[in-house]
Image: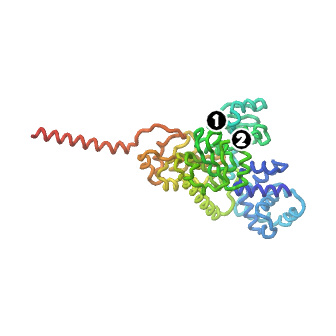
Amino acid sequence: MALYLKAAEVLDKVEQKKGAVKTLVYDSGFENIKQLYALVCETQKYSSVLQQIIESTRLLKETKLRLSLAKVLVYDLLFGRGVKCGGSWKAMMVKHRSRLQAALARIKVKQKVSRNEDLLPPGVQDKNAHSIPRYVRVNTLKTTVEDVIDYLKREGYSYQGTARRIEDLRHLSGKMFMGDVHLRDLLVFSAKMDFHSHYLYKAGHLILQDKASCLPAYLLDPPVGGHVIDACAAPGNKTSHLAAVMKNKGKLFAFDLDAKRLSTMSTLLLRAGVTCHQLANQDFLKVDPLAPEYKDVKHILLDPSCSGSGMVCLSDGGSEEQDGERLQALAAFQLHCLNHALRFPQLQRVVYSTCSIHSQENEEVVSACLEKNPGFRLVRLFPEWPERGHGPLTQCLRASTTETLTHGFFVAMLERQTTPSDGESLNIAPSAMDLATSAPTGGEEQQTQRPSSEISVEQPNFTTKKKRRNRKKHKKQES
């Protein structure tokens, strides 16, 4: 009984975006972590199917169960190894078993499939076919990559060097590990490797963070001693990463509306050795950009609430209509946050990221923001990154299980424009955003030639003056 209660509790927290599944499971205090994690993940995978079964049988009305608890019980009854508890819950499930099995059979007939696995949404089936490695970020506030590698080698791990391509990461097994091909502070292990009980993790030397989630802080690359805002900060991995990039110097303002998440985040930052932060239990949208404490803020990381559709362990439950309404509400909120971030007077760059695969939360939000804020332009990020934003916003990055061996993710960087000519080339509709490819690459400023439009303006003036001089010369000769 405790297993199902705890699984339902974790599912509720995942739905509320209070943390990643694995983190929530390990923080739950449940005795059998592996059993709980497997039940939560499998229930999430079949979430939309379970929803249909529960609705068609009116199970909630007849049993008074809450939805998350009903899902884990029905999953174990129909897809797992049977309900493992005794007492009233098992009696209840046995009572409704024939109706639930009949509902499952009808869904299979309707979809013309014979296996349970074939009922999974195509996106979830694709995710299952690609195993994501275990990424571990070295916390450079407490140690170095070299020291961690040496420590692990003494423990019997086999270091394979730095990967040269993403494909190299597919072949890790056992205690083999490599340095990541793109991010120097990232080590990569086989998908089955678990560090939650490892000393280096408990001491804050290692941060368990997916590679895609490391991109925002890495690409924002705030200077040492700078003033930075992490707008929607909890659970805190990106905040600790920003602090590491800043070498714990300067000011890092971190906001989150959820007091419990902020409390958990405070513990995480303490363990990571972060000292340059100022936590605030506050809605970022209510932060005054003109307040004197933010007058030197030049960099903002904005990772707002999203659908979470890129997370491998999650699936989009519910009807298309419900999903559409939810995405519309999320996109409106995300755009509001991004527009608000651009109001900070000294802002130079903002990184916008989501763990969503939907264009409505990604490219469409960025396009709408650029239309409203012509003083900003897109920066072309990481030219060597294999997966780009949907056209025409190819300056942005996308990540996926298939192309980058990560969770689904999206990253864009907006930069304040410094010259009028750049503004002219980018003030057109978002469909012309490919003109921004002359923007600094990888977050570094470069010297660029003047746009051809400037040269074409100056050339006619030169010709006109030359003609005038020729006419004056002819007149003198005639006289």
Dot 2 amino acid type: Ala
Tell me, for residue 184, which label it has, or none. 1
476 up-or-down from 412: above or below: above
Q: Position of residue 222 (x, y in %)?
A: 58, 41
| Disc on the earlier residue, 1 or 2 | 1
Residue shown at the point (62%, 52%) measured from the top left: 357
As drawn, is 41 to the left or to the right of 217? right
Q: Position of residue 461 (x, y in %)?
A: 28, 44
The C terminus: image quadrant? top left
Dot 1 amino acid type: Arg
Can you see residue 169?
A: yes
Tell me, for residue 272, which label it has, or none. 2
Q: Position of residue 60 (x, y in %)?
A: 78, 67
User: For residue 288, what is the image quadrant?
Assistant: bottom right
Find numbered disc 1 in the image and state the secondary structure of the residue it sits on: loop
Q: For this rendering, which residue is in front, 76 or 237?
A: 237
